[in-house]
Each structure stands twice: as structure tokens, then as C-alpha cells.
Image: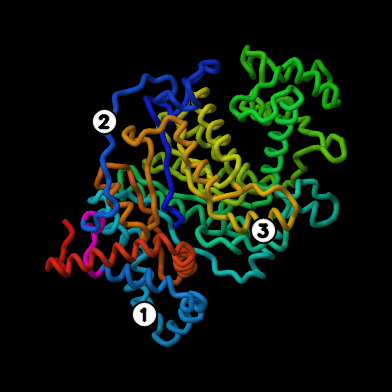
Amino acid sequence: MAWKRVFLLHRVAQRFAAFSKAPGAREQTTASPGTAQGCGAAEAVRPPVPAVDFGNTQEAYRSRRSWELARNLLVLRLCASPVLLAHHEQLLHFARKLLGQWMFDKLMKMTFYGHFVAGEDQESIWPLIRHNKTFGVGSILDYGMEEDLSPEEAEHKEMESCTSEAERDGSGTNKREKQYQVHPAFGDRRDGVISARTYFYANEAKCDNYMETLLRCIQASGGASDAGFAAIKLTALGRPQFLLQFSDVLTRWRRFFHQMAAEQGQAGRAAVDTKLEVVVLQESIAKMGIASKAEIEQWFTLETLGGSGTVDLLDWNSLIDSRTQLSRHLVVPNVQTGQLEPVLSRFTEEEEQQMTRMLQRMDVLAKKAREVGVRLMIDAEQSYFQPAISRLTLEMQRRFNVDKPLIFNTFQCYLKDAYDNVTMDVELACREGWCFGAKLVRGAYMAQERARAVEIGYEDPVNLTYEATNAMYHRMEELGLHPADGQVSFGQLLGMCDQISFPLGQAGFPVYKYVPYGPVMEVLPYLSRRALENSSIMKGAQRERKLLWQELRRRLCTGSLLHHPV
């Protein structure tokens, strides 16, 4: 299930988030990239890890009344019916016409809506949030509204919002790599995605409305708990054309670094261990004709790189900053043609303003979160948006994660470069002295990513096997994580995996439920995805139904059907 394997990683020691070296200690070595408990902190004596029995139904469902267990069982059983799922949209439409809106809302609240959604507004969700907190489970609030577009409408919006004005009017050509070009066959980004919400750009006013909704959600999360979370998607905050173009820039810049590394005999090294000799690098860049040797020497100074005489990927990425001279020459060699090409296309004045407003909306949300003490999780999205999303999130972390982790990035462990990305961000946090925070997930777009790579013709970004993704998860243990440190939190969706959430919470582990809320009609698309997701992961759903039956039978046999949670 979508959130069955979510890990929230956050700070360790006094200021720094988890698992790496002290700020400034760039040459310090450890047994592995994360064996130090915090950036240079001494290892503390840890208490034993509490035992958790996920098969003890009495403890797992202690927070639930018997009628809630019966409803859960009914909903999960209906989600397992292929016939109902194949026609669920028509059945919902028919039920609404037959019953009328008031009765339809009542029926939904007694079944699917009541199972997966906390309530209609900020006031109505508080009893559930407080109840779960009593049993050790926190909340991640999310307003569950989703737009109900036809596939044709979604494709039209995507093609319009991901194409620049110059590309539309023919005055400019699209020089982005294939992966970062919009394609009509994948214009409807919902296709093949059932465990993640999708937003389509319409105009700036709609983005402003979504920001206002998020501000209310952040405010509600701050009022509902002391250490709450709120989740946001950057594609809802602005025009996705900017994310595509910026992702293309970042990817080509990183690939250029690895090409230079290969020339220096460092091909195949882990990203965090690859270091280029500055003198050799300067000579290579000068031969390409990007700039004069004197100009190039000014880019690589003690101020920008320190005195090591080498450049690693973090140093390299910093050179793309708009404040550096090098960014004015932002060109890389095209491997196919051998020609130097600019990696950043010109924006029109309107496109510049749209990009600026996206960044401003992010800033407003982060400041509100800091004001009310809520942590923001920036959701991961498709791989062709993700480099830009991660870079923008990183910039927010630099500003807002000074004393504690407030902004959390998301890493999808089914991507081949997930471990490199995590270790590089951890290392950067330690160098610069801010708190690292991250959410680790499996990933929600695998089928779509694979199909798109084959259709358009670029390397599949997803691990080849399920076992490889599992191995990526387990590699995160190299970062020095330990359950007793309180650095790792767990999360599941409301209505899913209570047999995991509540035993963890009652054993003292930080655990959260992803809690959507909103009016019945506005969250119907969300409910459709939850039903489809349950049907797609049969083993997990079968085990959950088995445990629910087991607990109901136990209560019946022991005369405790009227169990009242305390």
C-alpha cells in the first residue's frame, strides 16, 4: 500500500539531521557514509529497541470499536471485488441519482468516506486526530480535493502548460532531452497512477487558490497537534514547464560532471566519493572553448571550493547558482553532435513571472509552517519533474532547517539514483550546518515511468526488479539509523494498515497517519484511487482482512463486542 513503507528521516545530535559528518569536516572518514551518529557527534548509549507484535489483533485494534472493524472489513472486501471496481464510477453516479445528495452523503460517510477520510472540514477532523494521538499515532493533514477531468482535458492542459511560448509559436526549438519533453501519449499524468494525486496547471489564480487551501491545512495541522506534518506538491503551485526545463538543466549539468570524472579515470564511483582534480578540469573546459583560461580560473577559487584542489559533485552543483560567473556560460557538449549548447532556454517575461510566483508560493507556505510549528513534506513526483523539485526543496531546507528539520524532501527508492541523491544531500547538510529531513517511499509512478521511457526512447530510471528497490531501502541503513534514536518515523494512509500503525505507536515509535479531509463530492476522486489501490495490492489487503476477522471473532467469543477504546 502506498504508505506502508514510508520512512521519515530527520535530525540527529544537536543541529544536524541524521547520519553523516560534521559541517566542514570534508576530509574526515568514517567506516561507512553514515556510521557517525550525527555530524561528528559521539555515539550515545542506546536503549533496547521495543518489541512489536504485528500479529496481536487485540493490541492492534484496541483503538477501534467493533462497528468500525466491521465497516473496515466491509470496505476492504468491496475493494477486492473486480466487478464493483470495474464499474465503481457508474455505480456511484447511479446511487447519487437514486438516493439524492443528502442520502448519498450519509451512505458514503457510513462506508468508504468514513473509512478513508477524516471529515469535511478542519473542525470535524479534530476528534479523530485527538483519538489517534491518544494511542500514539500522529497526523499528516491533507485537503483531499482532486480535480475531476476527462483524459482529453488533462492532456490538453498538460501540453499547454509544459510547452514554452517560443516552442508554441515556432520561434524556438525544443532542445531539452527526450525525458524532459512533454509527450501527448503521457499528457494525462493520472494514467497508470493510483496511489498519488495529480494536479494540472490552469492559471495563476488557481495556483493561488491551492496555496490558500494549503495555508488553511497548515494552520489546522498546527492547531491539531504539537508536531504535525502537512504535504504539498510543487506541480500544484505553478506552471510545470519551469520544472521540466530546470530538471533538464540539472540533469545535463550532473552528467557533464560524470563525463569529466570518466576522463579522469573515476567512472563508476559513488557520487559522494567522486572528486575531480581542479587543474585537469580547468584544462578540459578551456579546450572546449566555453571561456578563456583566465575566466575559468576565477570560477574555481578558494572561496567557492575550499583548499582541497578537487571538485566533488556538491561543489559542481553550487557552480550552477545564478550568482556565479559560470552560470552565464551555461553550456554543455552535446554527446551526439559534439557541439556546445546552452542548457537553459530563454524565458519570456510572463514565464519569468510565473516561475517567480511559484517560488514565492513555496516561501509563503514555508514561513506559515515555521510560524505554527508544522513540518512540510514536499511530495515526490514523476522523474522528469523530480530534479527541479529536489533542488528547490534543498534551497528551502537551507533557509528553514536551521535549528530543526522543518522541510522534508521525498526520495523514491525505486529510482536507480535514490541512494546517491540521499547521501549527497546528507553530506551537504553536514557541510553547511543545517538539518536534513527526508521521506523515503517506494514510489508511485513505476508503470507510467517504464512505459514513457520505452515510448519516448530514454533509459528507464526505475530499478529493474522489486528486489533492487528493497535493496535500495536496506542501503539506507548504512546512514547510521537506529530505531532507538527517534530519527525515523513511519507513516500509513488513514484506513490502511492499522495493524502496523497502532502497534508501532503504542510501542513508542514515531508513527503518523496521512489524514485527508474535505466535502464528500470533492474527495470522490481520492476515494476512487483508494479503492483501486487496495485491489492492486491483494496480499496486503488479504492479510488485513484476515486480522480484522480474527479480532471480531475474538471479541464475539469473549463477550467484548461492545469494546470502548480507552
Q: Which of 237 and 179 is in front in this view?
A: 179
Check disc 3 and report the residue beneath it.
Answer: 451
Give the residue pinned by disc 2.
47
Q: Nearer the viewer, residue 202 or 563?
A: 563
Give residue 102's mark: 1
Q: Residue 402: in sight, yes or no?
A: no
Secondary structure, mark 1, is: helix
Q: What residue is drawn where x is 60% and y is 47%?
A: 463
Q: Does the magenta stretch include residue 66?
A: yes
Nearest the viewer among 226 and 550 is 550
Query: Residue 494 placed where, x, y %?
Result: 37, 58
Residue 240 part of the magenta segment? no
Tag 3: Cα neighbours inside 10 Å, few (<14), some, or many (≥20)? Answer: some
Identify the residue shown where x is 71% and y is 29%: 257
Query: Which picture quadrant has residue 262?
Result: top right
**Distance of mark 2 from mark 3, alpha carbons?**
47 Å
Magenta stretch? Answer: 59-67
In-image side of 108 versus 453 (left or right): left
